[in-house]
Image (cartoon, rainbow, N blue to C red):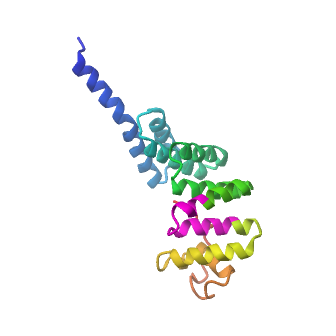
Amino acid sequence: MAGPAAAAEVDSSAAAEGPKQLSYGLHFIKARDYPRAIVHLTAAIQARTLEPERLSDAYYFRGRALVRTQRPELALADFTQALAHWPGNVKVLRVRCRALTLKGDLPDALADCDRAVELAPEDWRGWFTRGLLREARSERNLALVDFTASQARMPKGLETFPSVARQLKAYGLLADDAGAEGSAPPLPLWQEE
């Protein structure tokens, strides 16, 4: 016969399911096994046991995995859900800004980028992402301001990362020989991780 102790044990294991699935999902994200990450992150979300910030992270990372599996519309929906659970999640604001920029929804993208920079003014990535947005909007002077602010805040040496260097060079913020990789083919544009 099941008593209160058995019920507490069931509740405890059910409560642990969300964090456990989130952990598995993150493991598969790191392993770049995105389909398996999506399965576990979906289970974490459906467990309904995560606190709001962790639930936001589950949606964020599932969105990242969806981007990697070429499903940008589903990813955008997940980024929006992530912000519904944690409106101040700066990494989600940056990534949704970039996704909206690539989609062509520039006014909404600008709102996300502005909020990311407002919440984390010392984080170079918000400035860089907003610079990419402003470049897409053909606002070259404003993009220059954002790329300059980004460069001033980024960790030493990061400006040589090929896609970052390419943007900084395009705006005259980096010498032509900085970030040179010899004859190696260019890498894809920098993406939020």
Task: Specify whether residue 192 is in view.
Answer: no
* Residue 121 image offset from top left, x and y in percent: 53, 67
Q: Is residue 141 left or right of residue 95?
A: right
Residue 113's spot in the image, x, y percent? 62, 60
**Front position in the image: 75 or 82:** 82
Give the residue drawn at x 60%, y 51%: 67
Whole-percent x, y for residue 52 in the image: 45, 42
Figure check: 174 above or below 106: below
Residue 30, picture quadrant: bottom left
What's the magenta bit mostly, secondary-structure-wise?
Answer: helix
Residue 123 seen in the current view = yes
Task: Judge by depth and name the residue closer to the eye, 191 or 98.
Answer: 98
User: Going 65% across and 55% down the picture, which residue do you hit?
Assistant: 99
Residue under the point 60% across and 70% down: 187
Residue 56, x across and y down, in percent: 49, 45
In magenta, the rendered stretch is 115-133
